[in-house]
Image: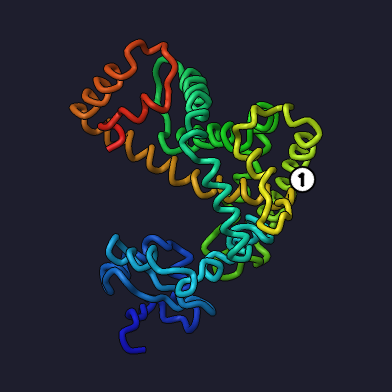
Amino acid sequence: AKGAPPCVQPTSKIPVLGSCIEFGASPMKMVKRCYEEYGPVFTLNIFHKRLTFLVGPEAHEPFFKLGDNVLAQEEVYGFMKTVFGAGVVYDATRKKRQVQFQSMANGLRVSRLKNYVPKIEKETRDFIESWGDEGEIDLLSALSELTILTSSRCLHGDDVREQLFAKVAELYHDLDHGVTPLTVFMPNAPTTAHRKRDIAKLEMDRLFGKIIESRRKDPTKGSDGTDILSIFMNTKYKDGTPVTNEEVSGLLIALLFAGQHTSSISSTWTLMFIAAHPEILKRVVAEQDAIMGNASEPLTFEKVAQMDLLYN
């Protein structure tokens, strides 16, 4: 079509499967090659789908500004139904999705975040104390684990974090690894990763279902009421219908997916950058010393908000 993005020619000459082979081997490598050859906007033909890539802030702009009537989220993310479940986020109607997103936003308001800071600080201090005085760590791996720990505490609540964390982390691992390049095109293909993903989803629903039923019987049991699980449990759609246990489980999984990778990767890059620039490290430490005063004092949301250098 006139004005359409350029269509990528695969490096492999195998009919039909050319782009599939290259994309499956290394999506990032292929995107980099296409960006260098075709520019920031290009289209791939893979199986029965046409994938248009927008690379860079200028190319991203229309994607984030256009409404659902032009760019339908459910068409792009439909394959995630296998992870989040039926009727959750991109498998929900637009009206239901708006309620679900609003409940997520309610859990991330400043008033809530203030309650999460002591929990995050405790998890971080306990985690770092386990390192010992010296040694080496894989920064991305360590921060990925810490992100899961803090997420479990803030999203799921104290009862899940204290009693079921190991199981939840194991199930999340199988869900996460159950999303592969093939999943985008064939979400139900009979692969080992998909089978483990489906088993993990059923087990996660069962596990959270038991927690939800226990809390409904005794709302004060295992939670201080500030975790996002509590918010989802009490959410109702505009027609008065409550969110089901399976939908609560799916929303928790969706929120974990939304934050886990972005948080662990951004924190890893931040620490790597600081470590590579000693002069910035000195300034960051000086800023924290000035704001915190006594290091034994508890961290607060207000103190974190004052750390402009670290934030920027």
Q: In terms of depth relative to the viewer, which is nearer, 199 or 138? A: 199
Q: In terms of depth relative to the viewer, which is nearer, 258 or 291? A: 291
Total number of numbered labels?
A: 1
Asked if residue 97 is positioned above or below residue 68 in the image, the reply reads: above
The residue at the far bottom in this view is 2
Q: Quadrant of residue 135?
A: top left
Locate residue 76 relative to residue 162 in the image: left or right.
Answer: left
Which residue is depicted at the point 34% across and 74% down?
A: 42
Identify residue for label 1: 206
Locate residue 282 relative to residue 150 in the image: left or right.
Answer: left
The residue at the far right in this view is 217
Amino acid type, residue under disc 1 in the picture: Arg
Image coords of residue 265 (percent x, y): 40, 43
Asked if residue 227 is positioned above or below residue 66 in the image, the reply reads: above
Quadrant of the frame with the C terminus = top left
The residue at the far front in this view is 239
